[in-house]
Image (tube, rainbow, N blue to C red):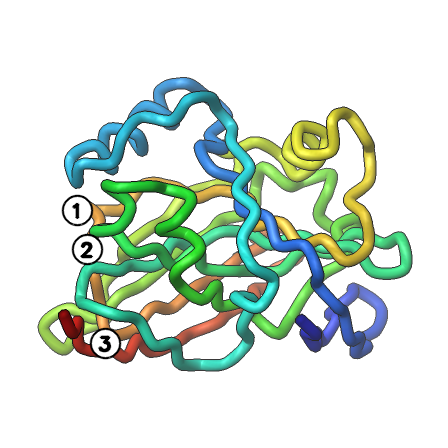
Amino acid sequence: MKLHFKIEAEKATSDIDVTIDNLVVAGWAGRDHAAIEHHIEELAALGVPRPSAVPLFYRVSESLALQGQRIQVVGAETSGEVETFVFSAGGILYVSLASDHTDRKLETTGVALSKQICAKPIAATAWPFAEVADHWDSLIIRAYIVEGGSKVLYQEGPLSSLRTPQELISGYTDGAAKLPDGTGMICGTVGAIGGIRPSSNFTLELHDPILNRSIHHSYAIEVLPEVA
């Protein structure tokens, strides 16, 4: 899947096209046990079985990577998750923003299948990872949904609560320090405020309070009927 990013570096802005032929979702990527357990229990309340190990790396179809502002899903029991997204191009690691949109009903049957069934919206802006590496834990991810006609904060947390990209890359590649070109990784999420639930719109933010900049993305969810 070919994606286009505007690279917002501190000294210059550029555009790159990136072909992602290996899309990976890092699951259960919390840095401390309490945070992981919270998310496991959050999903267990929906009937999702506990993971066999943490973290886990789910391969999903590269065609699910989507930079549009609308996705279509079957049934009303899906929801997004704000996560950072890392990829390499020309040997340089970049960070952007994605939503691991997931079918919650199907998740109770199989987590890997539930992740495969929904598109993974990805922002069109990215930063060089080197510019945020030394203050990675200070970065904040947020998500908003629409409830009762109002925009509501749905997720918020610092990246200090999640494993670093270096840890996840090493875990996925069996110890290699670099993410291969052509591989994109969705890097874990924080708990939902008020519980996991669907919405007609999902808005994502990655905020850097040190360099005072943010990456945003928003998409609408069109629900297709479940036909038996």
Q: Is residue 108 above or below residue 23?
A: above
Marks 3 and 1 in Cβ contact (< 8 Å): no
The C terminus lies in quadrant: bottom left
Q: Residues within 10 Å of mark 2 (few under 14, many from 20)?
A: some
The residue mark sitting in front, 3 or 1, is 3
Considering every residue shown, the one lying at the far right of the view is 90
CA gap between label 2 and label 1 equals: 9 Å
- Label 3 sits on a secondary structure element that is strand
Residue at (26, 66) in percent of width and height? 145
Residue 191 percent coordinates (x, y):
32, 41
The residue tagged 1 is 194
Mark 3 or mark 1, earlier in chain: 1
The residue mark sitting in front, 2 or 1, is 2
In the picture, measured across the screen, residue 134 lies left or right of residue 90, that is: left
- Label 2 sits on a secondary structure element that is loop
In the picture, measured across the screen, residue 43 lies left or right of residue 134, that is: left
> Which picture quadrant has residue 44?
top left
Mark 3 or mark 2, earlier in chain: 2
Residue 139 percent coordinates (x, y):
56, 47
- Total marks in image: 3
The residue tagged 2 is 197
Q: Is residue 200 above or below residue 211?
A: below
Residue at (70, 63) in percent of width and height? 20
Name the residue type under label 2: Arg
Q: Residues within 10 Å of mark 3 (few under 14, many from 20)?
A: some
Residue 172 percent coordinates (x, y):
67, 34
The residue tagged 3 is 223
